Image (cartoon, rainbow, N blue to C red):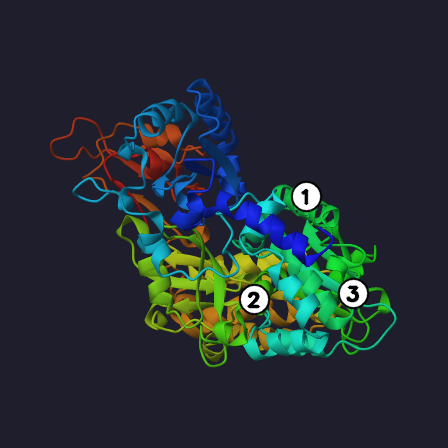
Amino acid sequence: MKTVAELQAVREAAISEVALRTGDAALAAKSKYKRNVLVCGGTGCTSSHSQDIIDTLNAEIAKHGMTDEIKVVRTGCFGLCALGPIMIVYPEGCFYSMIKAENIPEIVEEHFVKGNIVTKYLYKETVLEDGSIKKYNETDFYKKQIRVALRNCGVINPEDINEYIARDGYQALAKCLTSMQPKEVTQTILESGLRGRGGGGFPTGRKWSFIADGPQKYVVCNADEGDPGAFMDRSVLEGDPHCIVEAMTICGYAVGASQGYVYVRAEYPIAVTRLQIAIDEARANGMLGKNILGSGFDFDMEIRLGAGAFVCGEETALMTSIEGNRGEPRPRPPFPAVKGLFACPTVENNVETFANVPQIILRGAEWFASMGTEKSKGTKVFALGGKIKHTGHVEIAMGTTLREIIEEIGGGIPNGKKFKAAQTGGPSGGCIPARLMDTAVDYDNLTAIGCMMGSGGLIVMDEDNCMVDMAKFFLEFTVDESCGKCTPCRVGTKRLLEMLDKITRGNGTLEDLDKLEALCNYIKANSLCGLGQTAPNPVLATLKFFRDEYVSHVVDKKCPAGVCKHLLTFTIDKDKCIGCGKCAKNCPADTIVKTDYIAPGHKLPSLKILPEKCLKCGACISGCKFGAISKQ
């Protein structure tokens, strides 16, 4: 495609092939296929053998002579990872969940040949009492979502540029190159209110406007998604890689850059493969390279693989790594907009930020600004993990309350447990306690309560989680990931971790809590980069909202949640114990012995645990069927 006219011709030819999935009956009637079968090909479902499902589907469809009637598509992630592998069949829109390859012959025979949907394999919420079927996007998990960054994930084949073009792909780029000046593009992004989705929340349009003049400029996409429990950017790259190619090209046009780099961690092999396919397709079809769409504008891009260093999520460390050096942050100023990659002016945004750009250009700044809150416009993608029924990723309007996300979209806490807290922002963030569940989730509200949005990881915790242990977990992570360049981070986080370890072992004092808080504030104020500056946040947030748990650890020498094993005591109720000895067989330290006591109604002596020898591993509890063993 060398011209805009050729791009439009490709779109017109391809649009009917995705119409079944979008509900456009008139266009769908022009498709040669009667059904589209979409199978999740994201990392989660791939690890659950979704490729076996696709292979079996193709074989069964061929066996029944229906190859020309049914199109099987491997997509990106649908979002509801807890139910994978997922298969959605159009035009019915029915949602097959937790599918196995051995289920496919029955589904093909009954559903595709005979026309009878096999309801026993459907997601239960989609099957109504009268036996009718509800479409998956009408379920609690999906109906409150507004998909902008994720609009094509689970809808198109990410390895087919024509399917992306059929969904208005590269239309925003064509609009920029044919009817907008570079400053107009930047102004549109500024007026939309889009803020950086990587954690900082800096206005994207302002960042683009700061780019300095120079003979060479760069656009960098930060895909180094390193937060524990975060997988939003991975899902975009796996499900809609062309939107990143298009957005970075638009950004290059807006700021006058001719080269782009996507820095993505090597642990994302599916994302890397599909992004490279998208880059190659775009280049082959004239969307990258010289004289894009006959406009005279040149832009190209390539991938740089990261080795998994969390600090390389910081923009200057990321650029240092792209340059081939050890990933360490640089002092600012000068800022990257003046002196960034290879000492040239550079714009850096993360994957989700870029994923919003094409839709903002196509639909206008007012459309995007109409969603969200006054200072936090648009939508935000969150990765729901931890103690939540519907693990996966969701995209909701800014300002949605935490209660709506957890109880309505996420399906609540499993096993009848109570919600305790949600950790936002990963190792750089803080926790939101249950009493603040009605907090509207946006940049400013989270900052006001001592938390932060972060990149979008949202880890849910219930009453069985210890908040001191949680803070210790994140400190262990940041200690490991510190690059060591500055002393406050290198040494300070290590001292913080030692103090937390002392507290969880029952050796802490009340004075230690004051020292802990003081050290946190020192590290925040004196660290070189964002990793060190935000590393104390989980400690400060838990001290603020759950100080009583810290006090219990240092005064009562008890862990209220029963997590910190050094503070646990395992005991056997002598009246419940039947003396079967299974717990003793499970015990690796031979700490369980017989007593002289025989409980009423029992024939064998009950047992007891020798506390001085107990490893507190919990093997005894897992082996007892009678609830005779407890931990306190």
SS under mark 1 = helix
Where is mark 3, residue-wise? 218
- Residue at x 43% of width, y 26% of height: 101
Q: Look at label 2 and name its amino acid.
A: Leu
Nearer the observer: mark 2 or 3; the answer is 2
Mark 3, other Cα within 10 Å: few <14 / some 14–19 / many ≥20: many
Q: Disc 2, disc 3: CB below 8 Å? A: no
Q: Position of residue 428 (x, y in %)?
A: 57, 66
Out of 90 and 416, give the one closest to the viewer.
90
Query: How much space separates mark 3 and mark 1, taking CA atoms?
Result: 22 Å
Decide: is 581 above or below 37. Answer: above
Decide: is 580 above or below 261. Answer: above
Quarter of the rendering containing residue 557? bottom left
- Residue at x 78% of width, y 70% of height: 256
The answer to whether any part of residue 253 appears in the image is yes
Find residue 362 and name its label.
2
SS under mark 2 = helix
Q: Position of residue 459 (x, y in %)?
A: 45, 57
Q: Is residue 529 left or right of residue 423?
A: right
